[in-house]
Image (tube, rainbow, N blue to C red):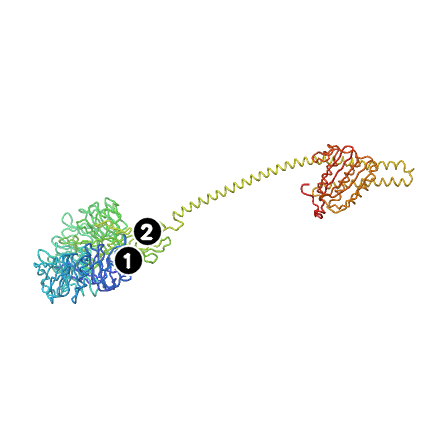
Amino acid sequence: MKALLSALMSLILCSFPATGQQLIVSQYNTDNGLPQSSVKDIAFDEWGFCWLATEMGLVRYDGQRFETYGTAEIKGLESERMEGLTTDARGTVYARVYGEQILKVAVSGKYAAPAPVLMPKSSMHVGQQGLAIADRAVLKKLAGFYSRLGPSPFPYASSISDSEIYLRNEDSLLYLSPDHAAPVKIATYTGRKPRYTISARRLFVSVLPGNRIEVWRKGRRLPQYQSITGPLASESHFLAGNFQCFPGDDGFYIYAGENLYLVWLGQGAFRSRTVLEHVAMPSLSSIRYVRQQDTYYLGSATDGLFAVRRSRFMAPPFSSPVLHQSIYAQAAVGQGKLVVKNLLVSLDAPPRALPVKNDISALLFTTPDEQLYYAQDYVLRKLDLRRNLVRDISPLEHGLVHFSQAADGGYFFGQPHGFARLVNDRVTDFKAFPVRAEIFYARQLRPAYFLVCTDHGLKWYDYTRNRIDKSVLDSMQIRTVYAETEQKLWISTYGKGFYLLQNDRLYRMPLGPRQALKTVHSFVEDGKGFFWLPTNNGLFKVRKGDLTAYAEKRAKDVYFFRFDRSDGLPTNEFNGGCDPSYLWLKDSLLSLPTMKGLVWFYPGKVKPYFPVKGIFADSLMLNNQLTPVNAGGISLDPDFKRLSVHVSSPYFGNFENLGLEYQVAGLDADWRALDKTGQLTINSLPAGDYQLIVRRSGEAFPNGASELVLPIAVKPWFYNTWWFYLLCICASVLIGYLLFQRRLTKLERQAAQLENTISNRTSELKNAVNDLARSEMALLESNRFKDHVITMVLHDMRSPLRFISLISGNLLKNHAQLPPAELDTYLSDLHLGTQNLLGFTEQFFMWIGAQREGFKVSQTVFLLDDLFEEIASLYKELFKVNHNRLHIVCTRQECVSDYQILSVVIRNLIDNANKNTYDGDVTLSCEAVAGRLLISVADTGQGLSEEQIALFMSRDRLAGNRGTGSLLIHAMLDYVGGDISAASAPGKGSTFTISLPDRRRSGTAGQDGSVPEGS
């Protein structure tokens, strides 16, 4: 949608005596916003928006922008060609669409601007004039009537209410009410070409050429109304039938001869008056007058929309080239005339030229006897306005900046660098200004005491004493000062704004829209509590009390109502720096100088058109995608990039007075001005809840300032949501609990492991202590055993040694006498004894080796007969000592065992048998029984008692001097997996049986011979 410029099509100047005003005509067409230049009808809705029916859609106008609704915007709409607009009794706007579709203007939510929606077919009846009909019974009658129409249809309908409907064509007029089953004909106008309209929403009027009217109410003609009085009665175009009729709220309008007339019912007759003159309107199609704006909206079927209003500002009624120039000072002459430059301007007569140059402008002063003082060519002069004579009074070093009445009848006048007196037109008592400053303006506060505006501030100057009593704003150039009281001064600077000095406290005032109040030329008080402030950028009206409230911090802002060229001013730039800078004429007519002549107006009659309608969110664009305005506000994802809100508020005056500003509450407290496009953009927001507040700036709206509050919720990232925090807390608690449990389990496990370790270590320590005790006992036992073994060995060695000693002794004594054969026998016995001793020693070393750790049994296969023969040969001679006989029973058995260990065991048994038998028999035998080899050593000696046998078989006894051999036998048999048993009876001998596993039968031969576990 194009940005609209309020184009001034023409300024139609009317004569001052007739209207005293000019018309402001603004035209809108395809050049500045309309989709098409055919405006068929105009209506205003209940929210203040203007709706236009065009050939290319239904158009909404808010005073600044046009918004078009067509088939692309309205789902189901079949045509964009609008026929007309009307309202119902509540003010709801309806549009007729070609194809018998109906649109209704409605709001879709709390914040949304009104927009058209498609109505169900046959739900309403929208005629050409009057109200829309929703009564079902009436709608049914109309539907039945139209379905039965013949060749003369009645395409036009005018509805005053649900109970009063008029149907018409070019020839006939019909009426329908609830009392009628169908429309009834009430008039025939064949060939008379009437114009139909509705007057003041109450009466149906038929206007015919020649100033004839027929008025109907509830289907009955009111015969007392026959014609129209007033200027229309003599209007030639109207009388000839060249006119158009349009309904109105106060009556009805007739457009004839480029003039628009209002016709109303008053004092028993239809009267008329001219409301617009010389308005050439091509193809006029509709009229709407808005009283609050004092504006006529005229629709043209070919040239778009026209907004026509009267300007409240005027120029002098009689034109002159001088009056269109830049004007400064002006001086009143009586109440009906004023001097401007070289003209004497009158309110009711053409201006009169004065015998002065055109360049006088800074200061003009007139006396009651119509004497004009002014400066020209550095000369103070006086012009007698009655006689038109000029007189030079005194040369001047500089121009005049001040002229005022003195108390003694003379005058004070000021120049840029001092003040002087004028008495009887003679200059006296010139006093140079006591400080170095250039004087621009002065105002006599009391006799001989001045407020002086200089380029270095405002000074309080005592002329009598020629001194400065006080100074403010010394760094600024002062433009003008207005003394409301001596303690309340309004001060204007040049380009630095204006101030209030009250009770010696200085307050800076706001600069207004566009900072236009940087330079205020005059403070014009209208007597009704308002200041009028002419500036270089428009004329402003402000409530004086609002400025005081702002200074006292009772208000945060001040509303300045701006008038500019769109309101009929010739320019936005006013003039100042002169004396006087404004002038009051008779009837409170105010005259202000501008860069393009004088502006006259009545401040009391200029009623500002304030914006009082609602503020709406017209549309939302989220990331460049159109988004509907929801009743709950706006919900944004955390990654949104751009939110654009198009704000609309219906106001058909100067956009500067709309004063829209917005704030994102929750983000910051700053208010930002909304530009003319009505669009505001938010690029990013942190997660949270906000309010987009759009309001009108200022504090002084007559009916209160409305505002739009649109909630905005920016969703947080999932990791910033409360449920995520809760989940994190739960997860943290759970993780903490799991870590605690894991730690607890680990500690418990470590405690158990430590306990087990302690227990194991304790057990190991205990075992170690036990082992140590056992080792100690074993060592002690071993030592004892070894002692006993040594004793046993020494004991056992005594027999061979005794034998050797005996043989060697006999040899020593008798070797000389012994024959060789006997000597050989003795030597042979000696050799045998040493051999036996050697064998015994080797067996002992073998036993010692068996006691070492890691000793292994060497299992071999051998014949027991060979072992028995070896033993027999070893003990042959020893047996002779005790006269015993050794018998070897041939067995032919093979044995798988350690040959040496078995030999030691058997020899020990043979030796014991030989020792305990005298002149007896010792038998060595073997037999295989039940998978075992039984080797027996039997003797016929003295035998053993049961106690001796038990002692021999005991393994737990301690080694001593006796029985050590049995311990050796048990230990050796353990190595080869054997055991021993004994049987004996005292005096009958003993039998010792060795039981060995028969490994040849069990298949265990050839094992590595490692010591069995536990041996």
Q: Which quadrant is home to the C terminus? A: top right
Seen from the viewer's position, the closer of residues 270 and 473 is: 270
* Residue type marked 1: Thr
The quarter of the displayed image where residue 313 is located = bottom left
Ranked by sequence position, the earlier of labels 2 and 1 is 1
Relative placement, left or right, of 182 versus 650 is: left
* Residue type marked 2: Ile
Relative placement, left or right, of 714 versus 350 is: right
- For the view shown, which residue lies furthest in the left direction? 224
Q: Where is residue 184 in the image (x, y as percent from the top left)?
A: 13, 61
Question: Can you see residue 343?
Answer: no
Relative to 836, does residue 399 appear above or below in the rendering?
A: below
Q: Mark 2 points at which residue?
A: 712
Q: How crowded is mark 1: few (under 14 residues within 10 Å), some or many (20 or more)?
A: some
Q: Mark 1 points at which residue?
A: 677
Seen from the viewer's position, the closer of residues 610 and 596 is: 610
Residue at left offset 89%, top offset 35%: 813
Q: Label 2 vs label 1: CA separation?
A: 22 Å
Relative to 281, does residue 933 appear above or below in the rendering?
A: above
Q: Where is residue 627 in the image (x, y as percent from the top left)?
A: 32, 56
Q: Position of residue 230 (x, y in %)?
A: 9, 60
Q: Residues within 10 Å of mark 2 (few under 14, many from 20)?
A: many
Give SS at disc 2: strand
Give SS at disc 1: loop
Relative placement, left or right, of 952 versus 686 is: right
